[in-house]
Image (cartoon, rainbow, N blue to C red):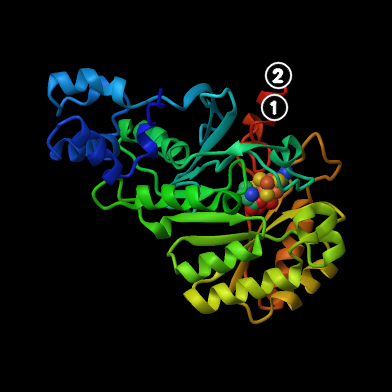
């Protein structure tokens, strides 16, 4: 028996083929596509534009609910919401919505969604809860798409829209390159969800060949690189991937990306007290980034159970930023969000899985 396809795994051409095989007219595929991506319908009986017979048969032809929300948490300030989803094979992933209200933030009403690309992660960064969990499996493109559509529907009910999507949840998107790009392309479809490429950000641990490939593809998607250290010894201690792709090779690939695309790179930096938050480190970082069109996004470490490091102080964070900026490298200190619901960077799913 062949497996019933998950509806979000399909491109419109796949859908057309499936309906043609059933002897249905081709516009039925467009109606389903619009129902999915413009009406945010999630269950067969919602597809009221279809004939009754087709609607009733839809659940036998296509699988709809491959992501089962098993836990939904809202932070105490109401601005961060996390959903844990169980996949058909019982793996758990999660996606987090962060609201930035114009009254309290400079974010002008942004609704940023942080989604997962893998269940677990193989990269083993020592400070990261997902890394501590190890690799489970790649998500399919549809499992990536479905996280976005789940929140799109939730926000639509409140008259709002997702404004940004960041691949900063569980997993390393460049270790699941094809499915991640397929998901972005599907969400990008002007006849579907029509979510602009520029509103996506991919965050990578620094897989050099994939950064080069991404540069060659000249996509409009934003690129963020998790750097976290300015010398190889320290970076290898924190991020084993550095033994394979060291900082020089990584920065060379970033320069190549900027040359190819004309777009700036963001470097992510988790400030760990006494480890990478000193003025000396900031100066070393600035000298390495000199001449590269970039921006540093620093965030105090979110402590995790498997790592002894502590978050930097506000004072050290400000000093770090100031030192970088004096050396000509723009830097933003990001606030930690959703800590009370374990929705901070690198904290994802660990707490649920250890229940
Ligand atoms: N695998 C990708 C994207 C997911 S992690 C990557 O590593 O870039 C998203 C971001 O959270 C990365 O910058 C990662 O380094 C950071 N991160 C992971 N654990 C963290 C922690 N405990 N505190 C702060 N940032 C963390
Ligand atoms: Fe994987 Fe990113 Fe966590 Fe590193 S920081 S273990 S690459 S999810």
Kindly identify the residue that appears in the image at 74 percent across and 73 percent down.
248
| Residue 76 appears in the rendering | no
- Looking at the picture, does residue 133 appear above or below residue 276? above
Label 2: few (<14), some or many (≥20) within 10 Å? few
Kindly identify the residue that appears in the image at 46 percent across and 60 percent down.
221
- Looking at the picture, does residue 223 appear above or below residue 251? above
* Contact? badges 2 and 1 (CB < 8 Å): yes
Front one among 151 and 354: 354
Instruction: Give SS at disc 2.
Output: loop
Q: CA distance from mark 2 to mark 1?
A: 7 Å
Seen in the image, is 213 located left or right of residue 150? right
Q: Position of residue 85 (x, y in %)?
A: 52, 27
Instruction: Give SS at disc 1.
Output: helix
Q: Position of residue 31 (x, y in %)?
A: 18, 36
Kindly identify the residue that appears in the image at 14 percent across and 19 percent down.
52
Residue 351, numbered circle: 1
Residue 276, numbered circle: none
Q: Position of residue 13 (x, y in %)?
A: 27, 46
Seen in the image, is 242 located left or right of residue 146? right
Residue 131 picture quarter: top right
Kindly identify the residue that appears in the image at 53 percent across and 39 percent down.
139
**Quadrant location of the N terminus?**
top left
Front one among 183 and 3: 3
Seen in the image, is 26 located left or right of residue 153? left
- Looking at the picture, does residue 129 appear above or below residue 228? above
| Residue 241 appears in the rendering | yes
Most extreme residue toward the front is 1
Residue 9 picture quarter: top left
Q: Mark 2 sits on what residue? A: 355
């Amino acid at each position: 028996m062949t497996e019933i396809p998950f509806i979000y795994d399909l491109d419109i051409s796949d859908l057309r083929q499936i309906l043609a095989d059933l002897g249905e007219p081709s516009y039925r595929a467009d109606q389903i596509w619009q129902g999915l991506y413009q009406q945010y319908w999630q269950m067969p009986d919602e597809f009221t534009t279809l004939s009754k017979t087709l609607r009733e048969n839809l659940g036998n032809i296509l699988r709809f609910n491959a992501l089962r929300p098993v836990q939904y948490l809202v932070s105490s300030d109401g601005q961060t919401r996390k959903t844990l989803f169980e996949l058909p094979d019982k793996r758990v992933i999660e996606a987090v919505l962060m609201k930035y209200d114009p009254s309290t933030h400079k974010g002008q009403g942004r609704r940023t969604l942080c989604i997962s690309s893998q269940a677990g992660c193989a990269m083993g960064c020592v400070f990261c809860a997902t890394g501590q969990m190890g690799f489970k499996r790649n998500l399919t493109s549809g499992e990536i798409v479905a996280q976005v559509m789940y929140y799109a529907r939730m926000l639509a009910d409140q008259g709002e829209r997702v404004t940004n999507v960041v691949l900063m949840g569980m997993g390393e998107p460049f270790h699941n390159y094809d499915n991640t790009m397929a998901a972005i392309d599907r969400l990008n479809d002007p006849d579907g969800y029509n979510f602009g490429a520029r509103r996506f950000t991919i965050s990578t641990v620094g897989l050099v060949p994939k950064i080069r490939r991404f540069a060659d593809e000249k996509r409009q998607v934003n690129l963020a690189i998790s750097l976290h250290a300015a010398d190889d010894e320290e970076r290898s201690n924190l991020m084993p991937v550095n033994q394979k792709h060291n900082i020089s090779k990584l920065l060379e690939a970033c320069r190549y990306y900027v040359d190819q695309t004309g777009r700036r790179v963001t470097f992510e930096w988790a400030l760990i007290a006494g480890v990478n938050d000193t003025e000396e480190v900031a100066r070393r970082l600035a000298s390495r980034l000199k001449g590269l069109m970039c921006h540093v996004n620093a965030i105090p470490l979110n402590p995790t159970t498997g790592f002894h490091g502590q978050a930097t102080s506000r004072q050290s964070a400000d000093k770090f930023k100031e030192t970088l900026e004096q050396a000509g490298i723009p830097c933003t200190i990001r606030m930690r969000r959703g800590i009370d619901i374990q929705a901070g960077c690198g904290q994802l799913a660990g707490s649920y899985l250890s229940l």
